Image (spheres, rainbow, N blue to C red):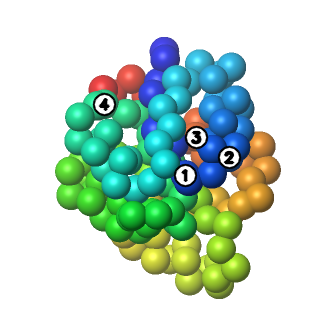
């Protein structure tokens, strides 16, 4: 039941916090620093869920989401944002781009766990 989650965020502490929350629930986590690394990983490995921060160097989350969609149209992707942008507008934009859902920082544990459980593929690798 070890489902593999890719976490792309340029903040190491944030990536570690997500992995710390998910690993006791049976998820394996691979963390990368930016969207370009996330796209490269998705192109070479099978993941059950991808989590992308919006604001990252080299390639932001929306661009990574679009590239992941072109490679794997059915890959569940959860977008993360710490932005002060209008939340409703951002949510609409990421859903239109193909994200399963959007979570805003600072993350609360229960919504994070619920989103991961809801959207992670169930052994469909």
CA distance for labels 1 and 3:
16 Å
Mark 1 or mark 3: which is in front?
Answer: 1
* Disc with the residue nearer the chain's start (2 vs 1): 1
Name the residue located 46 percent from the left edge and 63 percent from the top edge: 57
- Residue 66: x and y, percent? 31, 64
CA distance for labels 2 and 1:
7 Å
Mark 2 — residue? 14
Name the residue located 23 percent from the left edge and 34 percent from the top edge: 44
Mark 4 — residue? 46
- On residue 116, the disc is 3
- On residue 45, the disc is none
Name the residue located 32 percent from the left edge and 39 percent from the top edge: 41
Mark 1 — residue? 9
* Disc with the residue nearer the chain's start (1 vs 3): 1
Secondary structure state at the residue bearing disc 1: loop
CA distance for labels 3 and 2:
16 Å
Secondary structure state at the residue bearing disc 2: helix
Q: Quadrant of residue 113?
A: top right
CA distance for labels 4 and 1:
19 Å
Mark 2 or mark 4: which is in front?
Answer: 2
């Amino acid at each position: 039941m070890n489902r593999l989650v890719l976490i792309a965020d340029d903040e190491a502490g944030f990536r570690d916090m997500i992995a710390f929350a998910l690993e006791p629930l049976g998820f394996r986590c691979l963390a990368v620093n930016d969207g370009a690394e996330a796209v490269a990983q998705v192109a070479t490995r099978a993941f059950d869920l991808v989590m992308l921060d919006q604001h990252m160097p080299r390639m932001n989350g929306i661009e990574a989401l679009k590239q992941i969609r072109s490679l794997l149209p059915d890959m569940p992707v959860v977008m993360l944002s710490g932005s002060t942008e209008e939340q409703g507008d951002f949510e609409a934009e990421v859903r239109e781009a193909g994200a399963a859902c959007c979570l805003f920082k600072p993350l609360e544990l229960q919504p994070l766990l619920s989103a991961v459980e809801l959207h992670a593929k169930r052994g469909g690798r």
